Image: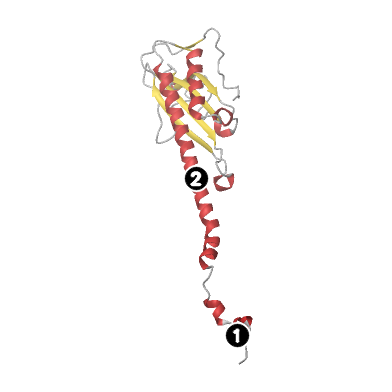
Amino acid sequence: MTATRPDAAVKARPWTSIFRDTRGLAMIEFAMVTPVLITLGLAGAEVTNMAIAQMRVNQISTSVSDNVARVRNSINEADVNEVLLSASILGGSDFPANGRVVVSSVESNGKTGADAGQYIRWQRCTGALNVAESQPKYGLQDKGKTNNSLQFMGTAPRKIAPAAGSALIFVEVTYKYQPLVSARFFGTPVLRSEAVYNVRERNDQTLGSASGATASVCTTYAA
């Protein structure tokens, strides 16, 4: 009897058996699908992070507007600075360097006829973001004081103007998005939110000075 060498049987296999061999198939499929799953997972994390960032921007605008409007009797630079500091706390450690808050006190300009309108009595800002989107969208301090150049704040269909004898605290918040994973997913867009509240129980809308308080003027950009 002639002995058969072990490797002879292997060589005798028909080539078609190679295509029917399923050993390692799961591993190959996993290797092919893994990059797609990882990409989807990272993209999902980036979407979630952006949603949280937008929610935080919305919360800052609402909180700042409400808190400034709540100051009773009179308001001064120290009051505004305190509220602006809270915006930095709400925004997190990266907000001061990548965000901007603009607070405008708006009321009737007291004119009649063709010059009647609104005006920005005072305006204060904080944050280091200095891009086109972070500038006051509706005008600077004193806009509309002597003419009708400012009829309302906001854009259609959300235009708003203060009632006679009252004032609005209009807040604009912008934040340059900082990616969690990579800017390749959505880039670094500037997120924006606006909020407005009526002033309550304050008859004097003048922004007074305060001992030891430095005015947060809108020409300053600092974290």
- Protein image colouring: secondary structure
Residue type at the position of mark 1: Ala
- Which secondary structure lies at badge 1? helix
- State if disc 2 and disc 1 touch (CB < 8 Å): no
Give the image location of residue 34, x and y in percent: 53, 57
Q: Residue furthest front?
A: 1
Q: Which residue is identified by label 2?
A: 45
Give the image location of residue 218, x and y in percent: 57, 22
Give the image location of residue 109, x and y in percent: 44, 18
Q: Which quadrant of the figure has residue 129?
A: top right
- Which secondary structure lies at badge 2? helix
Q: How many marks?
A: 2
Give the image location of residue 136, x and y in percent: 53, 28
Residue type at the position of mark 2: Ala
Q: Which mark is residue 205?
A: none
- In this view, the residue in front, 180 or 50, is 180
Quadrant of the image containing the N terminus? bottom right
- In this view, the residue in front, 33 or 165, is 33
Q: Which residue is identified by label 1?
A: 12
- Residue 153 appears in the figure: no
